Amino acid sequence: MQKSQIIRSEPDEHGHWGRFGGRYVPEILVAPLEELTEEFTRARQDNNFWRELNQLLRDYAGRPTPLFHARRLTAHAGGAQIYLKREDLLHTGAHKINNALGQALLARRMRKQRVIAETGAGQHGVATATVCALFGLRCVIYMGAEDVRRQALNVFRMRLLGAEVITVNAGTRTLKDAINEALRDWVTNVHDTYYLLGSALGPHPYPLMVREFQSVIGREAREQILSATGKLPRALIACVGGGSNAIGLFHPFIADERVRLIGVEAGGHGDSLGEHAARFHTGERSGGGCIGVLQGTMSYVLQDPNGQIATTHSISAGLDYSAIGPEHAFLHDNGRAEYISSSDSEALEGFELSARLEGIIPALETAHAILPAVRIARESTRDDAIIVNLSGRGDKDVQLIADLQR
């Protein structure tokens, strides 16, 4: 890769970052995706669109979120200063509201009255149901049966907000299968339905669009850390499922080559296919990811030797997806970002560590990044700073943790 490509990390007009991304969809979805691309391109250049979105992010969602100096976690690590970007303090409890508000404004511009979405951990579903209630839009959420079981509180919240929640019993009954059902719905109802995809994946323009709406995280964090320390951080750390919270934090720092960008995948409870969701560990695991196409985009995908999509596992409902967003694949292959993994047990340890040392109960997804942050802090000096994206709060996971401890 040329250095200019690494620094810009922008897709071409067809939505490719290098060989990753693109638009691999049935013919019936080509026109709706072209329509969405054209509307997003117009909105991206419309100051009134950004003015309204920024006002909603401020007055409704609660931005800017604080950058909190985690002093007790820092003391425990004994190295670099650890800062937490507090996306958990947003309305609905996670970063997902940033993207949901932006796409709801697009749906309104396109005069779509029905919105569909998929959800895994439930936070994107809650955010989508919330913005649909705000704008008076009909809302349908697809959610795998296993995730419905794990995230009963969020299912209740979605229904309370007026959404219809459809349980998906096909396949692994998780996020991948929820996306499949949402795409089938969209194929059938393209004339009046907007698909509000929740992560930086899927066919173009979704990976670009979601990244643009989530980059507010990194823009704020950059300004806040410079104000607090007078210099850029040593590293940024975020959990990675599809990758929206991570790319939102990373993108405004991509040109700063001295800032390490570290994504943390779900290591699950083993190395074999079906026991984890670590797409990038091709050389270290007997069941790693390889390049393929899943749900409209080319990226790293967990597949068996016959090319069939593999099952995944994570203690967190939001990280057990078979593929990863194409921009992450691009950043991985050109070496700009690093991707590691945390096991289920390490995520639980990080969950408890954050709660006991800082009085902050993180989402299990976010908890995957806590122990890696401690390890990286120990490798750095006290004059350095690292930022962990605290992408969501753990209210939704408390019952699951309680059940595991019985």
Image (cartoon, rainbow, N blue to C red):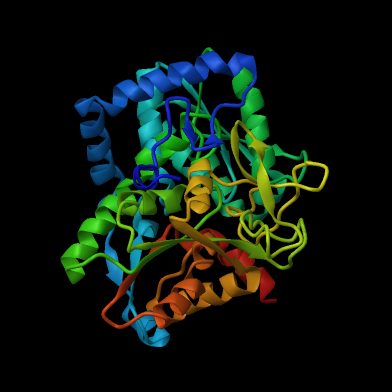
141 shown above or below 289: above
Q: Residue furthest front?
A: 2
Q: Is residue 66 left or right of residue 10?
A: left
Q: Residue at x 42, y 82 (%)?
A: 378
The quarter of the picture where residue 379 lies is bottom left
Q: Nearer the viewer, residue 169 or 79?
A: 79
The quarter of the picture where residue 385 lies is bottom left
Q: Position of residue 254 (x, y in %)?
A: 35, 52
Q: Is residue 67 left or right of residue 182?
A: left
Q: Residue at x 64, y 74 (%)?
A: 345
Q: Position of residue 236 (x, y in %)?
A: 38, 63
Q: Residue at x 47, y 50 (%)?
A: 331
Q: Is residue 129 left or right of residue 236?
A: right
Q: Position of residue 63 (x, y in %)?
A: 27, 50
262 shown above or below 109: below
Q: Nearer the viewer, residue 2 or 278?
A: 2
Q: Nearer the viewer, residue 73 or 45?
A: 45
Q: Position of residue 376 (x, y in %)?
A: 44, 75
Q: Residue at x 49, y 67 (%)?
A: 369
Note whether residue 189 is visible. no
101 shown above or below 79: above
Note whether residue 296 is visible. yes
